């Protein structure tokens, strides 16, 4: 597998024709194999942006390109995992993992790919179990194996671990990052959990609200993501928290409810929208 390059070019989206845009003039790129987090307060447009990037929602304006190809519909090359694993309860673990291959005409690969994917997510011993007998964390691992079976170049995650307990969440965060890095997959993660962004991402885009726009880009250069007690982790987390608060402060300001004043600090990203469409 190999990660794809992702280019988001001048995306604006309005759910209602005359309403305020949910996201406004957003441009950024993600490098092949990079892990990017989209963070920001509830309602800043993280999920809207991810759904547009996955081809689930057509944007009002702008383009998303994956390796130069315009995204206009979902594809097995770019897959999304949601908070709910959406498994078929009457099927076994292996049958659920095989579904993507079955629906995309790759039935012949099932015999080799499914055991391989189950090994990757450490569920080999559960292949024949009914998915209903699995814990929430194990079910998310099944969903992950199903997503990976079609050899995607981009894996998009929409708060996939938020329903899990802290320990299971921490293990899955590290495992998903490790698997994506091992396979070279480009990762895009939506989360409001700053610790999750620091553990999983190489870079975080912090969004401000009303309308959703990029407020700040925060690089997260951490050698060690297994030990969260290091000064490097604390420093990265503090930097991200400061950017998050600035974005939230601006949101308070622009909605006219007061709040801390903030200097514009968008790294020129929204202005630097590529001209090509
Ligand atoms: N289907 C929809 N129809 C109309 N408005 C919508 C729809 N989905 C989202 N919105 C609006 O678009 C804005 C952005 O919502 P979105 O769900 O993308 O934000 P978010 O940052 O992912 O929020 P959260 O963290 O709470 O999930 C919000 O104002 C929301 O009310």
Image (tube, helix red, strand yellow):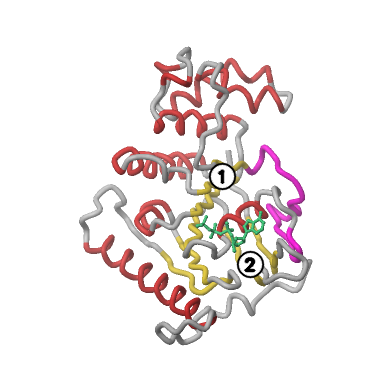
Q: Residue at x 50, y 26 (%)?
A: 117
- Mark 1 or mark 2: whose residue is earlier in sequence: 2
Front of the two marks 1 and 2? 2
Considering every residue shown, the one lying at the far front of the view is 257
Marking on residue 240: none
Q: Residues within 10 Å of mark 1 (few under 14, many from 20)?
A: many
Q: Is residue 72 left or right of residue 250?
A: right
Q: Nearer the viewer, residue 193 or 216?
A: 193
Residue 102, position in %: x, y? 68, 22
Against 87, residue 79 (above or below) is below
> What is the tally of numbered marks visible in this picture?
2
- Queried on whether the Cβ of the residue with tag 2 lies below 8 angstroms from ligand 1, the answer reads yes
Residue 133, position in %: x, y? 42, 19
- Magenta run includes residue 73: yes
Question: In the structure shown, which secondary structural element does the residue marked by tag 1 occupy?
Answer: strand
Quarter of the image where ligand 1 sits: bottom right
Against 146, residue 155 (above or below) is below
Against 254, residue 25 (above or below) is above
Q: Nearer the viewer, residue 214 or 134?
A: 134
Q: Residue at x 60, y 72 (%)?
A: 211
Q: Is residue 228 left or right of residue 105?
A: left
Q: Quadrant of the C terminus?
A: bottom right
Residue at the spot of label 2: 23
Residue at the spot of label 1: 155
Q: Residue at x 32, y 64 (%)?
A: 237
Query: What whole-number distance in Å separates the C-alpha atoms at marks 1 and 2?
Result: 21 Å
The span shown in magenta is 59-78
Residue 235, position in %: x, y? 28, 67
Q: Quadrant of the N terminus?
A: top right
Q: Residue at x 70, y 67 (%)?
A: 12
């Amino acid at each position: 597998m190999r990660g794809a390059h992702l280019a988001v070019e001048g995306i604006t989206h309005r759910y209602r024709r005359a309403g305020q845009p949910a996201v406004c003039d957003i441009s950024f790129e993600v490098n092949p194999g990079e892990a990017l987090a989209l963070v920001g307060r509830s309602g800043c447009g993280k999920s809207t942006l991810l759904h547009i990037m996955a081809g689930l929602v057509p944007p009002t304006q702008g383009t998303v390109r994956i390796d130069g190809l315009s995204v206009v519909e979902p594809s097995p090359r770019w897959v999304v995992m949601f908070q709910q694993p959406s498994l078929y309860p009457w099927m076994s673990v292996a049958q659920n993992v095989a579904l993507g291959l079955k629906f995309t005409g790759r039935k012949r690969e099932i015999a080799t790919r499914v055991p391989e994917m189950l090994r990757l997510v450490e569920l080999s011993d559960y292949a024949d179990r009914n998915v209903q007998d699995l814990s929430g964390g194990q079910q998310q691992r099944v969903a992950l194996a199903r997503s990976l079976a079609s050899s995607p170049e981009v894996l998009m995650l929409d708060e996939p671990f938020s329903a899990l307990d802290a320990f299971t969440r921490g293990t899955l965060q590290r495992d998903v990052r490790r698997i994506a890095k091992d396979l070279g997959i480009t990762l895009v993660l939506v989360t409001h959990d700053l610790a999750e962004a620091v553990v999983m991402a190489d870079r975080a885009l912090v969004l401000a609200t009303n309308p959703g726009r990029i407020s700040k880009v925060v690089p997260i250069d951490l050698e060690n993501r297994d030990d969260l007690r290091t000064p490097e982790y604390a420093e990265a987390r503090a930097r991200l928290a400061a950017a998050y608060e600035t974005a939230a402060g601006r949101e308070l300001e622009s909605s006219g409810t007061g709040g801390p004043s903030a200097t514009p600090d968008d790294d020129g990203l929204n202005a630097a929208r590529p001209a090509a469409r």
